[in-house]
Image (spheres, grey):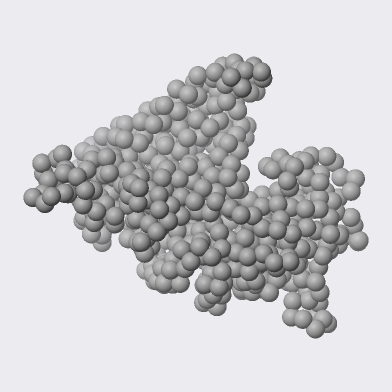
Amino acid sequence: MAKNYAAPLADMRFLLQTQTTRDIDDAMPLLDQAASFIEQEWATVKTLGDIRGCTFDQGQVTLPAEIKAAWIRYVDAGWMGITLPEPWGGQGLSATIGTFVGEMLSSANPALSMIPALTMSACKAIIAFGSESLKQTYLPKMVAGEWTGTMCMTEAHCGSDLGLIRTTATPLDEHRFTITGTKIFISAGEHDGSANIIHLVLARIKGAPEGVKGLSLFLVPKWLPDSGHATESGVANTVSCIGIEQKMGIHANPTCTMSFDAAQGFLVGRANEGIKAMFTMMNEMRLGTATQGVGLSECAFQESHAYATERMQGKALDPARRSANQADALISHADVRRMLLTQKAFAEGGRALCLHCATLLDRAQAGGDEGQAAEKVLGLLTPIAKAFLTETGLESASYAIQVRGGHGYIRDSGVEQIYRDGRISTLYEGTTGIQALDLLGRKVLGDQAQTLLTFTKQIHQLCASIAQPDPPIDHSSHPASGVVKSLAQALHPYAREWPQLAQQVGMRALQDHDEVGAAAYDFLMYSGYVCLAYFWLRMADAARADGLEVDPRFLSAKQKTATFYFDRLLPRAQFHKVAVQAGKAALSSFEDDQWSF
């Protein structure tokens, strides 16, 4: 059976203490409470939710009973609004805290975690762009978790090409419209876990320009609030679920096809500026999906480590690890340790990257010149975090199956669910390919690499500061100093190489724009490996500091995992560099009539 999830509080404490200025005496009690609640209430129903799934009957969607109960207990305990503004009933806590709580939620129960994640993102879009009337009417109950939210973009014929959206909006007055169309792949679009469901819908006002420039955003509730109506929720709107998908994973979260039949909706923001408003929600979800990737790696590591220490199979090749028993533990085999360390390196490195993104988000929301600078760097790192951490999370989940061998492929093990639930993470909120195009095309080349140069300057400065001679110390008590210096020396060349690689693609793209598409995926993966190396160097450097109230074994493990990352994972960046430099030729040589041979 699967191992019970345990929140990685020690690592979170270490990151808060060494990578932020936050008071851990304030933060850790809340994270301790969150961990206790999530481990007991959410993690324990993940398997049941997967087995039972959601049911659809004549437009009504029913959550698995255990999932619904866990969601209601979460709402009743007041967790829904921890990072939402106090004027609307939230607690106003930082994105830093929210990131760690979000990771725990998605680790413990990916399907269930999508309900609060979507609702919080919808709230933030309404806060940023909604009228005062919409805020007053909808935010208090959404922030409380009594009502939930969705994001309705995709249509069957267009997928991610939002410019092809056909859903129409017909004005009733300046702010009210009727919305007509069908949306697919709407997570939690219909369910029995809340009294009302608030849909944020992209649609085109009749006569608006073609493409994404003609899209507007509308708030379309399942129930139209009406204080004079007999029901608590109000008047039924003409919104209906016409089916749910039978999916590979996340069975406890309904993926709905939603029909809007002249449903009443309210304009959010300005007409024809819906993409701008929707991307407030989308970027929030992309960062949330990045933490889901971290959760994949963390859960995969916990499962793999527990099994590898208990399962006795084969004799160790290393005499130091060989026992007198008939067989040794799996963890004694070098290839199993390779998989475990890969999972651990991706989980802890990804957690540090997500924390950094959260601190940038906090600074951006504070405004001013510093906020604008933070927002630009956050824009650069968001597609890297979303795509790279979900891709590596899937690799980690695959290793969880591999460590168990044939037992991992069987449902009773619990690890195959990690992979099935996680597979969607590289697809929704923009596929890896879309994130790669956003990174290379918009965030790097579109910016003439200025923000990338700002970030690589930070890498250069860190490496240069570590390279400075140490003050006279007893090196026997600081053996990590030499290790960290060698890691800094290994990373330093990438601070120069990364922008140069972007420049090479940019020069080719001047002659042929398709060179950007050909290079984008490998450029993103290269960027991800270098990013994580930077955060692993930061952690390794912090772990050698004096005065940390941390178990010395934890600090030693940090150093060793950093060394593993640099020795065995960072070299993958060079493969992706070579692929970027190869250009589009090998991708473009096939003629249309050659594919079938």
User: Total of numbered circles in the picture?
Assistant: 0
- Provide residue 61's location: percent of width, then percent of height: 66, 66
Question: Can you give x and y, in whole percent of width and height, for residue 209 in the image?
Answer: 85, 41
Relative to 502, does residue 547 appear above or below in the rendering? below
| Residue 527 vertical placement versus 544 (above, below) | above
Question: Would residue 259 be found to the left or right of residue 408 on screen?
Answer: right
The residue that appears at 33% across and 46% down in the rendered structure is: 405
The quarter of the rendered structure image containing the N terminus is bottom left
Residue 378 visible in the shown view:
no
- Residue 60 lies, with reference to residue 554, above or below; the image says below
Query: Is 490 placed left or right of 384 in the picture?
Result: left
Q: Which sits in the foreground, 63 or 410?
A: 410
Q: In this orientation, does residue 59 appear?
A: yes
* Image point (67%, 19%), residue name: 592
Q: 29 or 429: nearer the eye?
A: 429
* Residue 285 position in % (x across, y down): 59, 53
Q: Nearer the viewer, residue 536 or 374?
A: 536
Figure quadrant of the C terminus: top right
Q: Residue at 71% across / 56% down in the picture?
A: 257
Q: With 389 as the anchor, is 401 left or right in this view? A: left
**For residue 578, what is the image quadrant?**
top left
List the single residue furthest toward the left.
Answer: 324
x and y, in percent, of residue 67 in the image: 54, 69
